[in-house]
Image: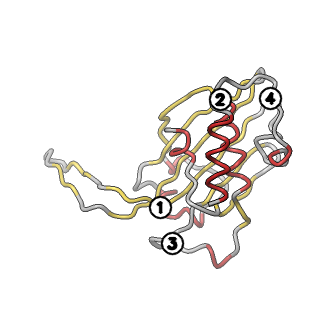
Amino acid sequence: MRSALLFCFLIILFSQGKIQAFNFPPHFSKTEIAKLKQGDSLTYYQCHVDSAFTEMTLSNGQKVKTKKKRITLTEKYVINLKDSIYTVKYYIAGFNSYPNKKFPYLTLTETDTWYFDLKKTTTLSIQEVLLFAALETKTHSIVHFELNINKTCPNEVIIKGKNVNEQFIVEGNYLLSRSLGF
């Protein structure tokens, strides 16, 4: 409840404008996005389980729909900082691609078999940058027993950058794509 209020507060407080010479609040100063330097980039892979209907098109053109079921998804956000402006490229992998089937055991090196598809490129507002920082504060390092592949796989995030290459469990149901409206 308290963390949900923090997210709501951030959305209301920082709901306008683009980043211009932005200083992070002290409680976000140790996050990786706050440490990002001019010209550098940071990549977030968020892996989670969601419910969805699937539709397949057979070779003869016939469409087959399934009942709603739990599937794993991997989303990728590449954030660049240039001239005090944060931009993001948002990608998502198809639900049957490699990272979506095995995300608890992902190596921290992306390969061509992950099949990410670019969905959106945009400039981030202050509010949106702070959402990335807030997500980082809601994570903890992975303990071995948390690495299981089943329908209750935990919400995870991999953060990669110049000085970071780590995988974390997200404490809660925080999804960047939902918060950012992607």
Q: What's the CA distance linking mark 2 and mark 4? A: 11 Å
Q: Taking 172 as reference, is 65 left or right?
A: left
Who's the residue at 29% across and 61% down the image? 68
Q: Amino acid at mark 3?
A: Ile
The residue where tag 3 is placed is 149
Q: Amino acid at mark 4?
A: Phe
Residue wearing tag 4: 22
Q: CA distance from mark 3 to mark 2?
A: 35 Å
Question: Which callout, 2 or 4, points at the residue further toward the start of the chain?
Answer: 4
> Is 90 left or right of 26, judged from the image as shown?
left
Q: Which residue is mark 1?
A: 49
Residue at x-position 13% and y-position 48%: 62
Kindly identify the amino acid type of the residue bearing the numbered disc 1. Val
Comes first in the chain, label 1 or label 3 = 1
Q: Nearer the viewer, mark 4 or mark 3?
A: 4
**Disc 4 and disc 1 in contact, CB within 8 angstroms:** no
Marks 4 and 3, how far apart in space? Answer: 40 Å
